Image (tube, rainbow, N blue to C red):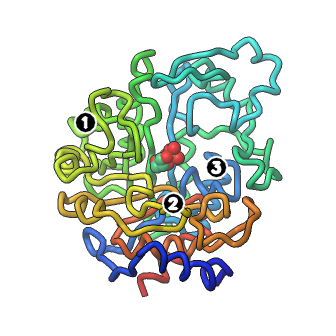
Amino acid sequence: MTLWRAVLLPLLLAGCGAKPMAAQPTLDGQPPIVIAHRGASGERPEHTLAAYRLAIDLGADFIEPDLVLTQDGVLVARHENEISETTDVADHPEFASRKATKTIDGVEVSGWFTEDFTLAELKTLRAKERLPKLRSTEYDGQYAVPTFAEILDLLAEVNKDRAKPVGVYPETKHPSYFAAIGLPHEAALLAILDKYGYKGRRAPVFIQSFEVANLKAIRAKSDLPLIQLIDGEGGPADDPKASYAAMASPAGLRAIATYADGIGPNKAMVIPRGALGTLGDPTGLVRDAHAAGLKVHPWTFRRENYFLPLGDKGGVNPAGHGDLAAEINAYLATGIDGLFSDNPREAVVVTRAAQR
Ligand code: G3P
Ligand code: CA
């Protein structure tokens, strides 16, 4: 137990009115799943085969690739199409002239974009740590940008001897932007999942998106499980009239249930933080989503003090590790059906222990 939890947290909670709650069940009574967010991205550069393999070795139930497209239409794993934060592209003089400024989902972005590179060109780059002030950079320069097919190959290899396969949880990134430049996600994504044997409602896959239209388009062609991502503010980039706040209302959740199987909310929508940064009381989001028949997979759980709530921090060094287990346990008590974590090393252990 950290100093924060042992000494300061009870005092803070006494002043904030936070109440312990009885543990709530998941939607289907099954154990919550651990989704390795961008792989084991707390320990390896995100969205690399090394990060995914480590996550699998650590017991994650699903691995999460965010997907963008190359100029030649190949799905690759990057969190955004601008790649200077997570690759060494800026160190490649042969690509200096590719630097550009574009408007992506209404935001002006400068850098290098996957849609301006063929897969062969992209493969000459190497991944680097996105958060070098918080995490080790010792693996920078070692790993290439993986294609979605390479990720599915990895899963096929590790799953061949498993009774319960490790699943894949792909996110379509900026789908309406990519569709507008002639590189839509949907057909490519469905074709490759079908090719690798992911078929039907029980396939070990969840397709997720912050946008709506691409999920509805996929639902029209497929019954693979779908997750509508929702954030604490703003709304889907493909529908300026919609807001995530309205989508998280009971009526909004019932509307999501007409095309999706669950929601992936910002974790603050499940348990907000108080003014002091401690965890507050849970909202009714899990209850309302379950009432609509939707699973709830909040994001993102990280072990560094920088990200943890006051009360679970292990000191004042932002890069130090605090009590991620305590934070996750508070969320598991709300009945969430799974969670995204950069740290499956810790998240798998605490999630399994909570089932005993
Ligand atoms: O997809 C769930 C979570 O990953 C959403 O946030 O920005 O990390 O893709 P982001
Ligand atoms: Ca994601």
Q: Residue furthest top?
A: 97
Q: Nearer the viewer, residue 82 or 284?
A: 284
Quick one: label 1 or label 2, which is nearer the N terminus?
Answer: 1
Mark 1 vs mark 2, foreground winner is 2
Residue at 65% over, 15% down: 100
* Circle 1 crowding by C-alpha within 10 Å: few under 14, some 14–19, many from 20: some
Q: Is residue 181 above or below residue 310?
A: above
Q: Is residue 154 above or below residue 235?
A: below
Mark 2 vs mark 3, foreground winner is 2
Alpha carbons under labels 2 and 3: distance apart: 39 Å
Q: Amino acid at mark 1?
A: Lys
Q: Which residue is mark 1?
A: 216
* Circle 3 crowding by C-alpha within 10 Å: few under 14, some 14–19, many from 20: many
Q: Amino acid at mark 2?
A: Ala
Task: Name the mark on residue 49.
Answer: 3
Quick one: label 2 or label 3, which is nearer the N terminus?
Answer: 3
Residue at 63% over, 65% down: 303
Q: Residue furthest front?
A: 15
Image coords of residue 277 (percent x, y): 55, 62
Q: Residue furthest bottom?
A: 356
Q: Nearer the viewer, residue 15 or 154?
A: 15
Quick one: label 1 or label 3, which is nearer the N terminus?
Answer: 3
Q: Which residue is mark 2?
A: 275
Residue at 27% over, 28% down: 241
Quarter of the image for residue 192 reads top left
User: Dividing the image into 4 quarters, which one contains the C terminus?
Assistant: bottom left
